[in-house]
Each structure stands twice: as structure tokens, then as C-alpha cells.
Amino acid sequence: MSGLVIVGVDGSAPSLVAVEAAAREARWRNAGLQIVHAFRWPPVRVSTGPPVPPPAEREVRQMTEGLVTEAVERAKSVAPSVDATHAVVTGEPVTVLEERSRAAELVVVGSRGIGGFVGLLVGSTAVHLAPRGRCPVLVVRDRPEPAGSIVLGVDGSRAGAAAVDFAFAEATLRGVGIVALHAWTTWNAPVPPPQDPAEPYASRPGMLAQAEERLLAEALAGHRERYPDVPVEPRVVHAATREALIGASATAQLLVVGARGRGGFAGLLLGSVSQAVLHHAHCPVAVVRSGES
């Protein structure tokens, strides 16, 4: 066995769905599984009623031990062969999971947890951890396990190269194909220099589309040779990136995106496309941060 998959739990239904997904990921990787529950101490409590003394830390730990024990049992029901351990840690959940991600291959969280506002598709832990994780972060919806291929969002940036690597490795583990999707518009495509100074247009009709097709081919270059058993469908569409990826996710089992890509503002850990798909994709989303972001 090598490697480690970490899953954050809080006792909510989405977090138990995340445990099942993490157990499968650990089985595919022949990796260990660590189930982590982090809680703030002293607890933050907002109340309009009379003050109520908080439970002692020992009592909280006893309650959470039962929570993680249930999570371990859930993991074993999905992947009995996986070595599943657990940890109850005092600290901010995002900070704890970010620190533990340094020693992990993958961190898995549910889309929403306890205390999530009704109507929000993704909770604060998922949104804040996705760009900060030191390894890929998989955000799982509390829905039946989807089928279909892996959809990979490709923008051709250096930062997005890590997402391409992850998607091909994940497709090998799952035994599925990849839809490599690159969406572009005249607003986000770099305009190539005119070939002829006398050309009346910045680019001839069709030149932008051809350039975007080359961009996708270059981003995938070498991966087909390294992963010959992974079927790949290159797909270049003239459409807004967010809408194209969200639409493609309806028939996917996983959507893979980079934390930030082409056109991202310096200093932002999570780009607008990654934010949008976390909130609106129909399937689980893996956000892959590059070493330089």
C-alpha cells in the first residue's frame, strides 16, 4: 500500500457520501484512508436566548468519536480491504484539512455540511479548501454515484497542466474515457498576429477556431502516449467556459478543472470558472492546484 486519501467528516449526510467516494478512491489507488473530523474549541455560538454553558471538550470529543466510528463503518461497507483510520482534531476544519493535505494524494469533502444554508449547493469548507489544498480536492455531491466519462476542462495555461495530468491518471484508475473540453469565445481567445500586414482583419475567418484547436491538441500532447488505454474525445466549442463545463457535467461522472487558469487575476486562489462549477456542476468536481498557484 502506498499513498493516503483524506476525507473530512462532520456527521452530515453529504459528508458520509464523501466518505463512500473517498473509500473508492483509496481502493483504486491501493492507498490508506484517513477520516478526519475537526472542531472549533471553544465553540462559536450565536444565541438570542439566555446563555447556555457549552459542553466540556471531553464531552465533545466523545460525541465526535461516535461520528467518526460511523464514518469508518461506512467506508468499510464500500471498500472492506481499505485500511481506514480516523482522527479527531481541534481546529478550524479548512486549516486542519489543508495542513493534512500536504501528506495526501487526494482530499475529499462533501458539497455541504452541518450548518449549511438552505439553497447553497456548496458549503464554505469546500469553497475555501479547494484552492488551498496541497493536493487535488474532490468535492462530492450528495447524489447517486454518476456514470459517464470524466470531463476535463482545458484552457491551455501552464497552471491548468496539473489538471490534465490528474484527469488522465484518474481515468486510468476508474477505467473510463475523457472528454477534453476547451471552450472559447472571441473575448477570451488570444488574437494571433496577422499573417499579412495588408490583411484587413486582425485574423482571417476560421483562424481563431484553428488556433484554439491547436491549443487543445498541445495541452493533450504526450498524454495519449502515456495513457494508451484511456479513450479521449477532444471537444472544442465556441461558447462561454462556465456554461459549457456545467452543461457537459450533466452526463459526466467527474469534472476536473484547475484552480485558476488563463486570464486569472494574480493573487486569486480560485478562478471564476472553478467557483462556478463548484456551485453548479451536476457531478463531483476535482479542483487541481498547480505548484505555481
Image (cartoon, grey):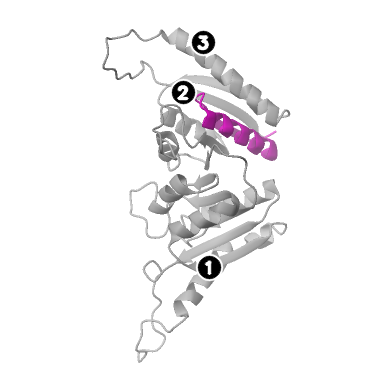
At a point 47% along the width and 31% down the height, the residue shown is 97
Tell me where the magenta segment starts and ends, as one range.
1-30
Near mark 3 (Cα within 10 A), the count class, few <14, some 14-19 or many ≥20, is few
Name of the residue lying farthest toward the bottom: 198
- The answer to whether residue 140 is above or below residue 252 is above
Q: Position of residue 236 (x, y in %)?
A: 53, 68
Residue 179 on image: x %, y %: 60, 59
Q: Amino acid at mark 3?
A: Gln
Does residue 29 show up? yes
Sequence-first disc among 1 and 2:
2
Q: How far, Cα to Cα, is label 3 from label 1? A: 53 Å
- Mark 3 vs mark 2: which is more N-terminal? 2
* Mark 1 lies on residue: 236
Circles 1, 2 touching at the beta carbon (< 8 Å): no
Residue at image coords 57%, 60%: 180
- Tell me how far mark 3 sits from mark 2, CA to CA: 13 Å
Chain-order first, disc 3 or disc 1 = 3
Q: Amino acid at mark 1?
A: Val
Disc sitting over residue 62 in the figure:
3
In magenta stretch: residue 162:
no
Question: Are dots 3 and 2 in contact, CB under 8 Å?
Answer: no
Circle 1 or circle 2, nearest the eye: 1
Q: Residues within 10 Å of mark 2 (few under 14, many from 20)?
A: many
Q: Is residue 282 above or below residue 218?
A: above
Q: Is residue 141 above or below residue 207?
A: above
User: Which residue corresponds to mark 2?
Assistant: 38
Name the secondary structure under disc 3. Answer: helix
Residue ID at (60%, 20%): 70
User: Magenta span has 28?
Assistant: yes
Alpha-carbon distance for marks 1 and 2? 42 Å
**Quick one: quadrant of the N terminus?**
top right
